[in-house]
Image (cartoon, grey):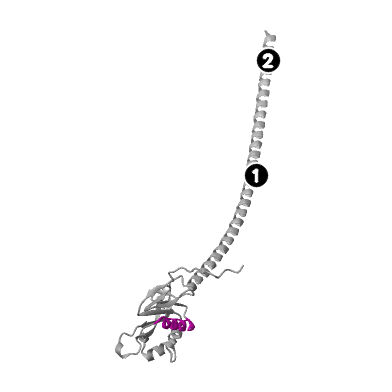
Amino acid sequence: MKNKTQVAISIGLMCALLTGAIVVQLNTINKGAQVVGSSYAEQSLKDAVLKWKENYENMYDTLEKTKSELERVRQETTKENEDSSKLEQELATANDLLGLTELTGTGVIVTLADNDTIDVSLVGNVNDYVVHDGDLIEIVNELKNAGAEAISINGQRITSATTISCQGTVIKVNGEKINSPFTIKAIGNSESLSAISRPGGYIEWLQSKNYVITTIEKSNNITVEKYSGVISPKYMKNVD
């Protein structure tokens, strides 16, 4: 009986020691797992940080390249806009000089009209008292010489292609019939343009002979109509 009790106690002690050893081993394993888990988590976090850093650097490089490209495009666009604006201005000026645009400015208005106040039976030649194409040409030439930048007669713009002609009793400007009174509008320095009424000038001569009725007045707001025809050069060509 005594031997059985000792054996039972011995077995109990051995079981207790074994249990303790198992508990210690399990705790050691758990702590090791925690350490390994913590190390793995830390490494994963470091890897993620490095990956984001790499992505950021790549995105930053892309952003810098994009900014440089945008700046290049902006500069080219600005240059193109400046060139386009310059070309548009040159085209507008050319159209003004060609008479293809309506213009306004200071200048003078010259009016010539047939003298219908005379007694036809008392004059030698009634044709002396009506306006002819030559009269209009003389006035236009004097206005050009005085610095006129744009001229029209009864709404017909005077251009390099303009013809002023007389067919019987009809005067044509740019191929269009016009009648008395003839209103000649000229844009330019009003003082210089009004000087065509000077002594010895064509207007003064017409007035002195009382051939036709003439007036000239300055104006700060004259509108000269644009040329409504088609300019079609036949002989001139560009130089290659």
Residue at 38 percent of width and 74 percent of height: 177
Label for residue 11?
A: 2
Secondary structure of residue under mark 2: helix
Determine the residue located farthest toward the top in the rendered image: 1
The answer to whether residue 118 is seen in the rendering is no
At label 1, counting other C-alpha atoms closer than 10 Å, the crowd grade (few under 14, some 14-19, many 20 or more) is few
The quadrant the N terminus occupies is top right
Name the spot of residue 67 as percent of width and height, x first: 59, 56
Examine the image and state in which quarter residue 196 appears: bottom left
The quadrant the C terminus occupies is bottom right
Q: Is residue 99 above or below residue 61?
A: below
Name the one closer to the observer, 136 or 40. 136
Q: Is residue 192 above or below residue 86?
A: below
Label for residue 84?
A: none
- Magenta residues, dominant SS class: helix
Q: Which residues are magenta?
A: 132-147
The residue singled out by tag 1 in the image is 50
Residue 184 highlighted magenta (yes or no): no
